[in-house]
Amino acid sequence: MTYSLIRQLRHLYHGLACQAARFEPALYAVLRISFGIVLFTHGLPKALGDAHGSMADPMMASTRLIGEGMGLPFAPQLALLVMLLETIGAVMLVLGVMTRGIALIFAVEMVGICVALGPTWPWIDRGIEYPVLMGFLALYIVTRGGGIYAVDSKVAQIAPR
């Protein structure tokens, strides 16, 4: 009886795994696109000068974090680069344009955020748990590329070799 149940469960699991594998390319696209949208929601308020969450001026907060929190020179210029990455780079990620390179830059940004906010772990205390997660997600996208539902893959199909 137990052996039969285990066999049936194994068969069910195998069938579900095969069905799920069919949707993997589309689900990966959803993952990449949602990651880009989340990043865009952080860049757009900086670009527009709008409030974002508890920050009245997210661009100024980024400049202050870069300059005072990290002690880096050229904080306004670096904050501008962050804003451009989180807007234009996020749109590129959503579309799957230069996916690996953009995702690598986002991974570096997440390391910078972790350095600036660390060593506190819980996000509730302005910690690094979400930037760590997003950094590893960016690295995963670096290894996978844009996937089949990306501009990158369409360009690769028509580009001469």
Image (cartoon, rainbow, N blue to C red):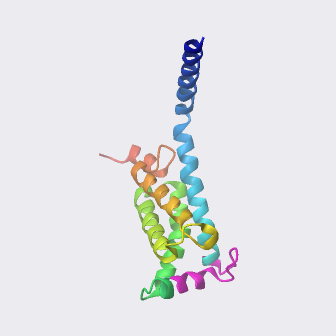
Question: Horizontally, is 22 left or right of 74 in the view?
Answer: right
Q: Is residue 127 above or below residue 68?
A: above
Residue at 41%, 56% in the rendered image: 100
Question: Horizontally, is 54 left or right of 154 in the view?
Answer: right
Indicate the position of residue 64 as horizontal and vertical percent values. 54, 86
Displayed quadrant of residue 105 = bottom left
Q: Which residues are magenta?
A: 47-65
Residue at 46%, 83% in the rendered image: 70
Number of numbered tags placed on the structure image: 0
Indicate the position of residue 150 as horizontal and vertical percent values. 49, 49
Indicate the position of residue 129 as horizontal and vertical percent values. 55, 63
Residue at 50%, 62% in the rendered image: 132
Q: Quadrant of the C terminus?
A: top left
- Inspect the magenta stretch and tell me whether residue 61 lies in it: yes
Q: Quadrant of the N terminus?
A: top right
Q: Is residue 76 visible?
A: no
Q: Is residue 46 visible?
A: yes
- Inspect the magenta stretch and tell me whether residue 136 lies in it: no
Camera-side residue: 141 or 5?
5
Camera-side residue: 86 or 16?
16
Displayed quadrant of residue 38 = bottom right
**Furthest-front residue in view?**
2
Q: Is residue 19 above or below residue 76?
A: above
Indicate the position of residue 15 as horizontal and vertical percent values. 56, 23
Camera-side residue: 121 or 97?
121
